Image (spheres, helix red, strand yellow):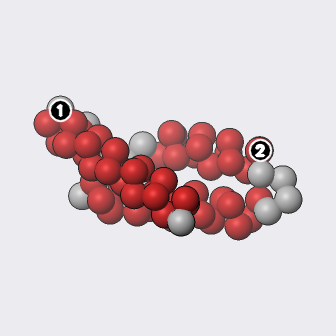
Amino acid sequence: MKIAKLLILRFYVVKQISNYKQSNKVKIEDKKREWEVINNVKKHSKQYKIFITKIFETIIDCSKKIQR
């Protein structure tokens, strides 16, 4: 349940960021930043790297959908 609560909180923040981006004409996608996040996840998640990377990729995709 803790993970679900943290995701809900994250998506609430994503919505606030979306409002800022729309008001300031900032692009939703930042491929460089996404690459940095994914590489950082891969670097720090040794044992279950594939699974944790997929989770983060899904979170990023969902965040972009919320912002649209």
Residue 48: mark = none
Does residue 27 appear in this view? no
Locate residue 59, reporting x and y percent: 49, 59
Residue 48 in view of the camera: yes
Residue at horizontal 49 percent and vertical 63 percent from the top: 4
Q: How many marks?
A: 2
Q: CA distance from mark 2 to mark 1?
A: 33 Å
Residue at the limit of the structure toward the right, as seen here: 47
The residue type indicated by label 2 comes to Lys
State the image coordinates of residue 6 (x, y, percent, origin top left): 48, 53
Question: Where on the picture, by quarter, is residue 20?
Answer: top left
Give the labeled residue for mark 1: 24
Q: Where 10 sits versus 50, above or below? A: above
SS state under label 1? loop
Say the numbered circle drawn on residue 43: 2
Q: Secondary structure at mark 2?
A: helix
